[in-house]
Image (spheres, rainbow, N blue to C red):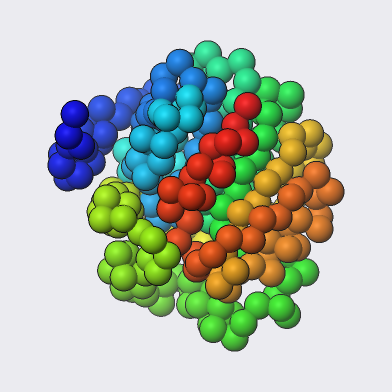
């Protein structure tokens, strides 16, 4: 059977997204991809993107026998905004979704800003979470890694935490996502990531700016306090935020750090997805 046109696939995935209602009246939008009878993996999208990001690994998830679930965090994609939220509140949203889907156990994964949310969810899930898989983690204002990052990365972080500047700079920085992929990005991957950024920003960039302030001004805190699941971090060698991954690995003794090729946006290659999916139990 021929692969569907990528634009058709993106449109069908958005149209096929589902929603659940929370007790506070908010709604969460999510996608359920891969092997519906497979081992469940709850994926947390990167800051500024949406659950559509998971579509880059959907075919590989099906082949690996993994059910790939992802939801839009508040204010992204089709989910209701929740200003001033924190990592714990998103973790509670994730557990409501896991309960709704009847997931007795699952693994979690996250890209960039999705990593701290995945850690917080794993800690809240306790024994129900089997593995945490982080890819190219965002930075943490509370981490002892600032002096190790490059001047360029420091400048970008400064821009991202100045709200009036960031509101203009963020869309500009991600205006040409295909050009940001330097390692093996397929045409489909490029189209999906561009669509995920557009979809994630459908309500504007307030949710993005809130997350950036959380990471780089307020700091994560200790979202993995009491975490029992093993953690595997994949992080690009050319990513300026690599020192944060080293700091995170040092703070949690159950963490394995795996350095991969590429920069921040290069993780969606088939090679990385396969390595990640192989660890879902």
- Where residue 262 appears, as percent x and y from the top left, is 50, 67
Front-lying residue, 91 or 145: 145
Whether residue 213 is visible, yes or no, is: no
Q: Position of residue 92 (x, y in %)?
A: 59, 31
- Residue depicted at 79% across the width and 34% down the height: 228
Q: Can the viewer see residue 154?
A: yes
Quadrant for the C terminus in the image: top right
Quadrant containing the N terminus in the rendered view: top left
Relative side of 93 to 206, left or right: right
Q: Position of residue 271 (x, y in %)?
A: 48, 50
Query: Is residue 181 or residue 154 the one in the foreground?
Result: 181
* In this rendering, position of residue 41 left or right of residue 104: left
Q: Quadrant of residue 87?
A: top right
The residue at the point 51 percent across, 50 percent down is: 272
Residue at 48% from the left image edge and 25% from the top image edge: 65
- Seen from the viewer's position, the closer of residues 133 and 162 is 133
């Amino acid at each position: 059977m021929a692969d569907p046109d990528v634009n058709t696939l993106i449109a069908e995935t958005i149209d096929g997204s589902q929603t659940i209602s929370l007790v506070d009246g908010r709604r969460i939008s999510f996608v359920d991809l891969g092997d519906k009878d497979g081992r469940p993996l709850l994926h947390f999208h990167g800051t500024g993107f949406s659950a559509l990001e998971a579509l880059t690994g959907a075919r590989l998830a099906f082949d690996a026998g993994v059910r790939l679930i992802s939801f839009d965090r508040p204010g992204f994609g089709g989910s209701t905004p929740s200003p001033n939220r924190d990592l714990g509140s998103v973790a509670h949203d994730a557990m409501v979704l896991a309960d709704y889907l009847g997931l007795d156990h699952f693994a979690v994964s996250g890209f960039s800003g999705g990593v701290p949310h995945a850690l917080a969810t794993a800690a809240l899930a306790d024994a129900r979470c089997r593995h945490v898989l982080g890819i190219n983690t965002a930075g943490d204002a509370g981490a002892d890694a600032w002096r190790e990052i490059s001047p360029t990365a420091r400048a970008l972080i400064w821009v991202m935490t100045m709200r009036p500047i960031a509101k203009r700079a963020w869309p500009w920085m991600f205006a040409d996502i295909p050009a940001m992929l330097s390692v093996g990005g397929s045409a489909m991957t490029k189209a999906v990531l561009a669509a995920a950024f557009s979809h994630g920003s459908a309500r504007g960039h307030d949710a993005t700016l809130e997350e950036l302030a959380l990471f780089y001004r307020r700091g994560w805190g200790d979202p993995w306090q009491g975490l029992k699941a093993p953690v595997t971090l994949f992080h690009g060698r050319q990513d300026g935020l690599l020192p944060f991954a080293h700091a995170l690995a040092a703070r949690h003794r159950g963490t394995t750090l795996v350095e991969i090729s590429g920069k921040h946006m290069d993780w969606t290659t088939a090679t990385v997805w396969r390595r990640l999916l192989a660890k879902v139990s």
